[in-house]
Image: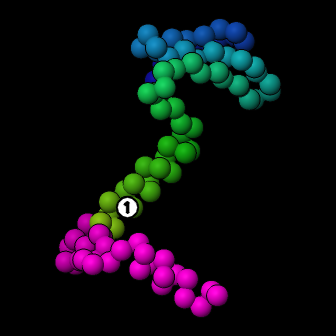
Amino acid sequence: MLYLTRKVGDSVVIDDNIEVTVVEVRGKTVKLGFTFPEDVQVLRRELYDRIQEENRSAAVSEDIIRHLGGSNSPAKGSSDKESDTDENVGNS
């Protein structure tokens, strides 16, 4: 891990196209500003970790379905229209 000391207004450039700027320091909190291309995804670590965990869970679920001989795709002949009808039964 690289450690840097920066002051408010100072920046760090990553890979020629990402800039991280120290915007504000208040007590133990640092506000950072990010400039990056639209095709670069930037996530808070806790959100990134949650997405990774959900992806792992989904992959395991698909593996279990395949292992049990099932399919995670709709049955032949079923359609969205049929499911909408099922969901709306008794709602009138």
Horizontal relation, residue 76 to residue 39: left or right: left
Residue 42 screen position, x and y as percent? 51, 32
Which residue, given by chain and number where applicable, does mark 1 sit on?
Answer: 58
Q: How many marks?
A: 1
Q: What amino acid is found at the position of numbered circle 1 in the picture?
A: Ala
**Does the magenta segment cover residue 89?**
yes
Quadrant hosting residue 60: bottom left
Image height of 62 relative to 33, above or below = below
Residue 36 screen position, x and y as percent? 52, 20
| Residue at 32%, 60% in the rendered image | 59
Residue 32 screen position, x and y as percent? 66, 23
Image height of 52 relative to 90, above or below = above
Q: Which range of residues does the magenta coloring cover?
A: 63-92
Q: Residue 65: in sight, yes or no? A: no
| Residue at 48%, 84% in the rendered image | 86
In front here: 22 or 36? Answer: 36
Residue 69 screen position, x and y as percent? 19, 77
